[in-house]
């Protein structure tokens, strides 16, 4: 149970990181 919760948190952090990079890249492309 604890392991699953930790895994979910790690996965959520990874998704957040990806979204941040995509948004940052789009903003850079728009100038």
Image (cartoon, rainbow, N blue to C red):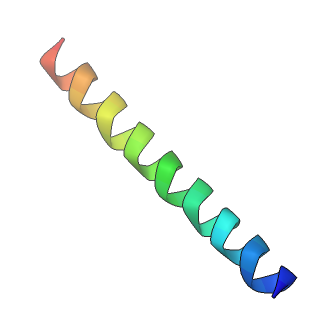
Residue 6 against residue 18 in the figure, above or below: below
Horizontal placement of 18 versus 14: left or right? left
Residue 22 percent coordinates (x, y): 32, 42
Q: Name the residue furthest front.
A: 1
Residue 26 against residue 19 in the figure, above or below: above
Q: Quadrant of residue 14?
A: bottom right
Residue 25 against residue 2 in the figure, above or below: above
Q: Name the residue furthest right.
A: 2
Depth check: 2 or 18 in front? 2
Q: Quadrant of residue 8?
A: bottom right
Quadrant placement of the C terminus:
top left
Q: Name the residue furthest top.
A: 31
Depth check: 2 or 13 in front? 2
Residue 10 percent coordinates (x, y): 68, 65
Residue 7 percent coordinates (x, y): 71, 76
Which residue corresponds to the image point at 73% horizontal and 84% vertical from the top-left?
4
Residue 3 percent coordinates (x, y): 82, 84
Which residue corresponds to the image point at 49% horizontal and 49% vertical from the top-left?
16
Count how many numbered circles sit on residues in the image.
Answer: 0
Which residue corresponds to the image point at 81% horizontal and 88% vertical from the top-left?
1
Horizontal placement of 14 versus 20: left or right? right
Which residue corresponds to the image point at 31% horizontal and 34% vertical from the top-left?
23
Residue 13 against residue 26 in the figure, above or below: below
Q: Name the residue furthest left.
A: 30
């Amino acid at each position: 149970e604890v392991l699953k919760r930790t895994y979910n948190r790690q996965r959520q952090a990874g998704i957040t990181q990806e979204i941040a990079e995509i948004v940052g890249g789009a903003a850079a492309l728009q100038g």
